[in-house]
Each structure stands twice: as structure tokens, then as C-alpha cells.
Image: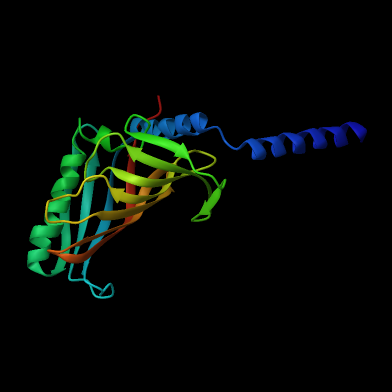
């Protein structure tokens, strides 16, 4: 019993030291890189259903335009979209949502998609003070992220990753570059959940304000994922 008591004391002492010291930023960042690489190597493709809604001004109850699409992603080929339904302003759909889908196609082309990953190759990452935070029922490390290059899809802000497997749980921040001269600063947020062990988007929100367009909010809801995994050899 004395040996058991000693072991418990030593174990608790070790945990206390780790809590006091905090996680090692280098180890966390390496874990993030490995988690992203695992997804890249193991997910051969996927389909899902995405619902886009655009809100104008202060009204975030009734969308000015909506579109439901079914994307198909294939590693090494990129992403394509099938429009399942659409409603609301034809102008917003034509000049807002369709260009957004075209931009997603461009981002996901081979040679481009690698620059959108949340890895140390693309971002400077540092742990924030305050320790582990609980987000969406998961214990997370919290990091500040600063993109190494400016782009409309590169976010400067905060990244939450699962404290166990280092997979992405949530991102929040502002685009490092405005999408156009007429658009103002864009604030973006995206949440993720594990699907077959890999992080996939579940909800996203982007808000921009400009003197020309006023306030515009775009939300995206993701669901009905079907992942094609690389066969285990």
C-alpha cells in the first residue's frame, strides 16, 4: 500500500508540473502539422451537402438569397459543385454566391489547396495564455495564428485544436486581404467535427462591412458527409 501511495503521489506531482509548465508550443504545432497531413494522406475524396444563406443589413432572420449545393472533392483533382436548390435575389446569387463557389474551386485546385492548410508552413502559431479551453464539448489548445502571406482565405486570428489529437476544432479571425476593393474587412469563423476520425467543416460564418455594400453576412451549414478513405495497405 505504501508503494501504491508513493506512485499516486509521484503521478499527481508529474501532472501538477505539466499543468504549471503548460504545453510545449513546438510539440503542439508539430501535432497540428501531423493531423493535417494525416487527413491529406487518408481522405481520397468526399461529398456533402452545403446550405448557403446571405443576409443583408441588420436582418439575420430572413436571408436575401439561399443556395443548397452538393460538392464533390477528389484529391489531386479539386472540387466541383452541383446546385440542388436556390431562392431569393438572383443578383446576389449571380454576383455573390456563384463567385464564392468559383473561388472555392480555385482554392482546392492541386498546387493551390496546400496554401490553404492551417500548418506551420503557412502560419506563424503561438499558444495563448489561459490554458486549455472547452469548445463544443472538446478540450482544446488555443493558438494565435498569423498567415505568412496575405490572401482573402488566409485568416489572422485564433485557432482551437483538440488537446488529444491536435485536429482543428474552430477558427476565428479576419481575412488578411479583402476579397475586392469594394468589400470591407471580412470576419470569418468556421467550426469542425470529426467525421470518420478526420476534421470536417460543420458551420461557417463570414461578415463584411463596407460603405458601398453595407453589412453582409454569409452562413454555411455542412452535413451529410460521405468520405472516401485511402485503402489501408
Query: Residue 225 at x, y = what percent?
Result: 33, 50
Q: Residue drawn at (24%, 75%), measured in percent from left and top?
A: 62
Q: Viewed as shown, does residue 105 lie left or right of 119?
A: left
Q: Does the rendering let one see residue 39? A: no
Task: Decide which of 15, 7 is in the foreground and name it.
Answer: 15
Q: Where residue 72 sits: x, y (%)?
A: 22, 45
Say which of 226 and 12 sits in front.
Answer: 12
Which quarter of the picture shows residue 229? top left
Q: Residue furthest top?
A: 233
Residue situated furthest front in the rendering: 211
Decide: is 175 above or below 89. above
Residue depicted at x 40% and y 44%: 199
Q: Give the answer, above or below, for where 145 lies relative to 50.
A: above
**Residue closer to the observer: 130 or 222:** 130
Q: From this viewpoint, is residue 123 visible?
A: yes
Position of 104 with respect to 193 (left or right) is: left
Q: Quadrant of the C terminus?
A: top left
129 on left or right of 218: right
Q: Position of residue 33 (x, y in %)?
A: 41, 31
- Coordinates of residue 79 in the picture (x, y in percent): 19, 42
**Which residue sits furthest right?**
2
Amino acid at each position: 500500500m505504501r508503494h501504491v501511495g508513493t506512485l499516486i503521489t509521484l503521478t499527481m506531482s508529474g501532472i501538477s508540473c505539466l499543468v504549471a509548465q503548460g504545453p510545449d508550443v513546438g510539440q503542439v504545432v508539430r501535432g497540428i502539422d501531423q493531423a493535417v497531413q494525416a487527413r491529406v494522406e487518408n481522405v481520397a475524396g468526399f461529398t456533402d451537402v452545403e446550405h448557403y444563406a446571405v443576409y443583408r443589413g441588420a436582418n439575420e432572420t430572413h436571408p436575401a438569397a439561399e443556395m443548397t449545393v452538393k460538392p464533390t472533392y477528389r484529391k489531386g483533382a479539386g472540387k466541383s459543385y452541383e446546385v440542388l436548390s436556390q431562392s431569393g435575389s438572383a443578383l446576389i446569387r449571380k454576383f455573390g454566391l456563384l463567385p464564392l463557389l468559383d473561388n472555392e474551386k480555385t482554392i482546392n485546385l492541386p498546387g493551390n489547396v496546400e496554401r490553404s492548410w492551417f500548418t506551420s508552413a503557412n502560419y506563424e502559431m503561438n499558444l495563448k495564455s489561459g490554458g486549455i479551453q472547452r469548445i463544443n464539448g472538446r478540450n482544446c489548445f488555443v493558438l494565435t495564428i498569423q498567415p505568412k502571406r496575405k490572401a482573402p482565405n488566409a485568416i489572422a486570428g485564433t485557432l482551437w485544436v483538440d488537446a488529444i489529437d491536435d485536429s482543428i476544432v474552430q477558427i476565428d479571425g479576419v481575412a488578411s486581404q479583402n476579397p475586392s476593393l469594394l468589400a470591407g474587412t471580412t470576419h470569418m469563423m468556421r467550426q469542425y467535427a470529426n467525421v470518420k476520425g478526420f476534421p470536417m467543416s460543420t458551420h461557417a460564418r463570414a461578415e463584411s462591412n463596407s460603405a458601398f455594400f453595407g453589412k453582409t453576412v454569409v452562413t454555411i451549414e455542412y452535413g451529410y458527409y460521405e468520405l472516401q478513405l485511402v485503402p489501408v495497405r
